[in-house]
Image (cartoon, coloured by chain):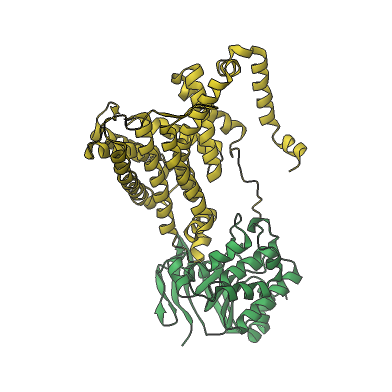
Chain colours: A yellow, B green
Amino acid sequence: MNVAAWLARNSRLLIVLIAIAAVLALFGTSVPIWGGCTAALDRCADVVAIGVFQGMIVALVALGYTLVYGILQLINFANGSVFMLGSVAALLGVEIFGLTSDSPAASVILAFAVILPVTMAITAGLNAGIERVAYRPLRRAPTLATLISAIGMDFILQNVGQIIIGPSPVSLPSLLPNDVILAEPVVIKVSHLFVTGITLPLLLGLMWFVRTTRQGKAMRATAQDREAAGLMGIDVNRTISLTFLLAGALAGGAGVIVALYNGSAWWQYGFSYGLLAFTAAVFGGIGNLLGAAVGGIFLGILISLNAFYVDPRWQEVVVFGILVLVLIFRPTGLFAEKQSERA
Amino acid sequence: MALLELRDVHAFYGNIHALKGVSLTVDRDEIVTLIGSNGAGKSTTLKTISGLLRPRTGEIWFDGDRIDGLRPDEVVARKITQAPEGRRIFPRMSVTENLEMGAFQRRDKGLADDYERVFTLFPRLSERRGQAGGTLSGGEQQMLAIARALMARPALLLLDEPSMGLAPILVEQIFDIVKDINTQGTTVLLVEQNALMALGLASRGYILQTGEIVLADVSERLADNPDVKKAYLGG
């Protein structure tokens, strides 16, 4: 691509970047993240690495938003709560299997070999059920009606979470060993490997599925032109259900990982992670799978830097701030498809 | 017995009475054309056959079975496919992927032959296999839309205004190809505004006016009909 043309097209983005660079240059080390990272690069690298792992979890949830948006042009606000119920299911699973901090590694692994797929199946079914009950009847209604229905579903699920585990955060026994595997150049622990080992295959698997399989292509076709997809002989309703199944499975998987990684489950996690994931999806260009994954990791890094160098309580401000900036300066996201769609 | 038969089909968009008792037949191996001006209900008729719109009353029969009320994918399963108005190709899928979608319900081994067949019919598409559908020219998109509809190996092909927005020389090319497709054993129901070309290709025609069939005859007689000449043939 022509660099000059790209710069001309993205002049506003450029202005923002220059402004940020100017602020950093002027105030130097008094900007917390900048100061921290210039003072101790190795620690900064650790913080970024932690952010990458968090970001992969966010990416899973973000994919759920972007998949559903792609096919229905609907923000499935219930997605965050489906994720939350995934961690609730993980908590219940831990109780059912009677796992404690002292459980041998083998039994923990065995238990999660059951808990993860079962949870993913449950949340997949739940998400598809939500579509069937709350969105499909409104398929021909104005988008706003479906959106309100989605928000309503979110409230319902939040309350279901509260009914199951109560209003306060519930701790899980610490099941992941805290052993450091790698100290240089960045600290990597067993828990990080666990996150990567589950997240990465799911992310790549989904991309592969959508790009190359028959059903995946049917999903893309339905997303691009629902009526034409029907004329090809694609069962559109089934394809939409499949999309919700996939999104729900990813959200549930992310829920299990978060419960283990953070060591707790709470009905409000749906909102905080949901907001992060939604912002990631918008950041990457909603409807764009790769964009959502990259956006998730980017946000993960950012909130990690924020938590370490600024204050974790600023997280929502940072995330909403980014959401607003993206919506103002680049509403189609960083990876917007530039292809013309002439008739 | 007719391959396709519409019996007194009434269809609505909300409160708008779009089809007011359309009855028509298409026999096996025929090309039949449905002519009418904008808003006469031509595309609506095809949408109703394809299952995108359900008739409120009336019946649609295909090959001895009643097909009104079926979903679009179930209609395709009966070997009726459509190249819809405005082409409606998948813009962010490659030419090959678009064709794959056309063959979505096919699981037989003969698929390779059909790719060969459409690439022979449309050499231009063969050159652009890997290109995204949205980057093709209008004529190429129309070729892709027809090729895609052929991939299901239809018994009946519904073509909705294949000439729309195309240069006359391209229209002729496309009509020649439709003729070829028909000789190779596919029945065609062709919706057109370009009445002259359509009647030249089809054996019979129906004239649709504000949701009603006002005339039905063999093409030669329709082309000679003074009313038709005045309204649709510019003379």
Q: Position of residue A167 (x, y in %)?
A: 27, 27
In the picture, the quarter occupied by the C terminus of chain B is: bottom right
Choose top left, top right, bottom left or bottom right for residue A33: top right
Residue A233 is at least partly visible in this image: yes
- Front-lying residue, A311 or B82: A311
Residue placed at 31% from the left, 40% from the top? Answer: A106
Of residues B129 and B193, the one drawn nearer to the viewer in this rendering: B129
Percent across and percent down for residue A221 are: 53, 57
Q: How many marks?
A: 0
Relative side of B219 to A295, left or right: right
Q: Tell me where residue A121 appears, x and y as whole percent.
A: 33, 49
**Residue A156, placed above or below residue A35:** below
Please name whichever residue, A109 or A221, is drawn nearer the observer in this view of the structure.
A109
Return the residue found at the far bottom: B1
Residue drawn at the location 53% of the way across and 37% of the way down = A282
Across and down, in percent, residue A267 comes to 32, 32
Question: Is residue B190 something one can see in this rendering?
Answer: no
Residue B136 sits in quarter: bottom right
Left or right placement of residue A265 versus residue A163 in this view: right
Is A310 located above or below residue B130 in the figure? above
